[in-house]
Amino acid sequence: MNETNRVIDSLQKVLCTATSTVSDSRVENNDYFKRRVLGFKAEIEFEKAVKDFSSELHFVEGGQFISKKISGAADDKNTFFYTTIDYEAPTAYTSVYKRISQWDEVDEMLYIQVLENDWTTEPFNITQHDGVKATTTILKPKFIFYQFDKTTSTFTNHLIQDFSVILQHFNEPARKPSLFKIRGDEQFRYFEQYDIRTLKKIYATRYFLDNIMRQAQGRQFIDLDGFILKNDKVVLVEIKEKSPIEDGESMTKWQYGWDSRRLLWYLYLLNKLDLAVLYNVRRVNNRTDRLFVQWDSLFIDDFLKGVSWSNSRGGGGGEDTLLAPYLYFKRLNEILETL
């Protein structure tokens, strides 16, 4: 097995084990596991689109806000760790971390640099296709852990150089997490078209979120897709792949939806951090063929100007989406020209 296939094999094991298969009858061909696996394509292609457009624009990875489940007591409030995983030197993220550090409910900010080399393997428990439990191996990435000082806006090596830097704040689960079956071999094949560096970064992030963080009881997190940086400007981006909701042949009847839970979260970040938020859809022709058409993009405040507040639509995964007119969206390049 070559290096590319080894990474894809480990990614499949980690994602399958942590992800249930839930079909949503409200939406055709909308299995959560399939959507999750296929969702990486849009994020990979968006980064390429930004880099191809202009060398003055810099795309960096989105991070994760991680918190404990609150007790419900009146004085128990959400507090967060903020983490990012990438190859870049931590200084590439200084402007992003400075902006997020303005939020006083973010207690600790960590940057986890993934190294391309010196990876090893480790044992990993799975449920095979036939339902039999087994122990296999997965790749174990190599990381360097940095902490961000809010006062000096600098990164320094953390004294703790493993994931206990985060796990020490959580109890272990009372019982072992479920091990969902290994499946979907064909859905992982599209990763073969991407370079090994890209694949290892994706895997390193999922190794953290879908493997390491399963050891933390009551953990809650919401991830960000990425940021576009230009000089001192920081734009938070949400990235999806879908086709418009078409109600008739006229585009005036078409709409795009935005997951109401994530929309609320982005509005909260916009107000807390004074961030521009750009919603980007990698438009495909349909759910089955998924042939690329174009990038459609819209800032969150413009989305809200056209949103239908009296109606929502089932978006799959148990979430509702709020809808805005398709013709409100512009081409991604038009938006990037204004940054």
Image (cartoon, rainbow, N blue to C red):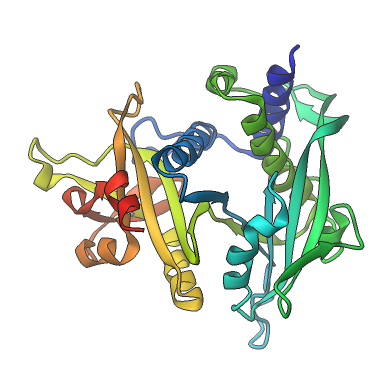
Q: In the figure, 11 relative to 260: above or below?
A: above
Q: Quadrant of residue 333?
A: top left
Q: Residue at x 54, y 55 (%)?
A: 224
Relative to 249, is 183 above or below?
above
241 to the left or right of 256: right
The percent position of residue 72, horizontal first and vertical second, equals: 64, 78
Q: x, y (%) of residue 112? A: 75, 52
Give the answer, above or below, for where 102 lies relative to 148: below
Horizontal side of 297 relative to 74 (left or right) equals left
Q: Residue at x 49, y 31 (%)?
A: 38
- Identity of the residue furthest to the bottom in this view: 75
In this picture, residue 251 sits left or right of residue 268: left
Closer to the camera in the image, 293 or 309: 293
Pick the front one: 227 or 251: 227
| Quadrant of the rendered image containing residue 159 | bottom right
Q: Position of residue 132 (x, y in %)?
A: 77, 21
